[in-house]
Image: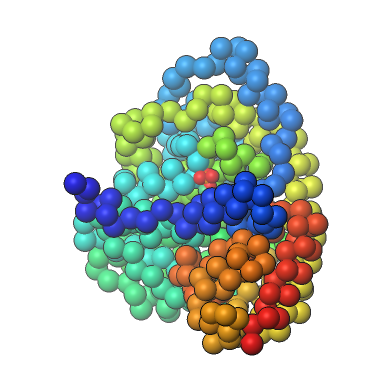
Amino acid sequence: MLSERAKNIKPSPTLAMDAKAKAMKASGVDVVNFGVGEPDFDTPENIKEAAIKAIRDGFTKYTPVGGIDGLKDAIIEKFRKDNGLEYAREEIIVSCGAKHSLYNIAQALYGPGDEVIIPSPYWVSYPDQVILNDARPVIVKTYESDVFMLKPEALEARITKKTKAIILNSPSNPTGLTYDRKALERIAEVVLRHKLYVISDEIYEKLVYDGAEHVSIASLGSEIKKRTLVVNGLSKSHAMTGWRMGFTAGPKEIIKAMTNIQSQSTSNPNSIAQKAAIEALTGPQDFVQTMRSEFDRRRRFLVSELNAIPDVSCITPTGAFYAFPNISGLFGKVNGKPVFSSSDLALFLLEDANVALVPGDAFGDDNCIRLSYATSMENLKKGVERIRNAVGKLK
Ligand SMILES: *Cc1c(COP(=O)(O)O)cnc(C)c1O
């Protein structure tokens, strides 16, 4: 009964793990949840007020499919100010979250026979969105010893006549890697030589640490800009995951195709959320810095605690809000059942220690697990203590 497409797709594993932890919590178990991929901060008051005002003003009808001009202009100004990028309105489209932006891109660009390069560890939706559009994900492994950075020669080795695009994510979910300008320049050189497109997911742009600088690959020159679709949104920067506000900037023919596709699926993103998004982009920005400082404090605590656990090692992430420790030193150890994979360990920690986290195999790296530190310091302390005790029982 189901289409081949539907049969080939799996639900988002991070959301599945989150649902399991929430269900345990609802049944009365005291679960510490490191699985969540969203800020634990509330959406700032000024943004909520803008939405309430939009409702009161009756701004509750269809809008232009790709977003209202006022929001497009705020996004254009954001790119100018933060990234040194100049775009016109017809080079911008607003969608129902950055995940939707990425999906529209997949629909507009990929087709049967196309190959799309995805460095691993990758964000869970990239390969499935490629598969959903009848193209083939080509996974290029990166290594912990390179802080998970894609090397240009590793990229080039996997390019064929069918390669259409590469998906880059800096700062990265799940590794926390932030690409520096030099690394991006070398990747851009390969992309241009082979006439590929870059899908640059920059959703964690505002969350960088230890002096790391976020650089958009599109800003490296006019040629690479013509080949880049920059994806960004407000979910992570302004604690607005539920509002569903994402946007794309890129060449106008592609943006136009994405707008046509969106016009036949969701129509415009929510009108009220669009007004809230204007306030998020143009109102006071101190919230972003407050949240970033708090994440930074938690990051340093969590990474040092993880490294103090025997047989666990964690590189220091410079972006996003995840730690991605290597736990392969525990493989082969036993407590009742043996641990042979990241999923075995995640299940053991959930059942034995009531700690929820996401196994690395969901991101294409079975040697690691992902812990989100978008949770309170108190939870972090309790959670790492439980992990240390549980891991100590593995012999
Ligand atoms: C959270 C996330 C997104 C999507 O966010 P939306 O809520 O859909 O805007 C996209 N990419 C990465 C890497 C993410 O972690």
Name which residue lies at 52% across and 32% down.
72
Looking at the image, is 338 positioned above or below residue 349? below
Q: Nearer the viewer, residue 157 or 193?
A: 157
Residue 36 screen position, x and y as percent: 61, 53
Q: Looking at the picture, does residue 269 appear above or below residue 178? A: above
Left or right: where does residue 109 sit relative to residue 318?
left
In the picture, measured across the screen, residue 158 lies left or right of residue 28, that is left
| Position of residue 141 measured from the top left corner of the image (x, y, whole percent) | 44, 75
- How is this picture coloured? rainbow
Q: Residue at x 63, y 74 (%)?
A: 325
Query: The C terminus lies in which quarter of the figure?
Result: bottom right
Numbered label tally:
0
Q: Quadrant of residue 48?
A: top right
Res 200 visible: no
- Residue at 79% over, 47% down: 290
Task: Pick the residue in front: 37 or 58.
Answer: 37
Q: Quadrant of residue 349?
A: bottom right
Residue 166 in the image: x percent, y percent? 40, 62
Residue 43 visible in rendering: yes
Image height of 75 relative to 10, above or below: above
**Is 334 drawn above or below residue 56 in the view shown?**
below
Q: Nearer the viewer, residue 275 or 79?
A: 275
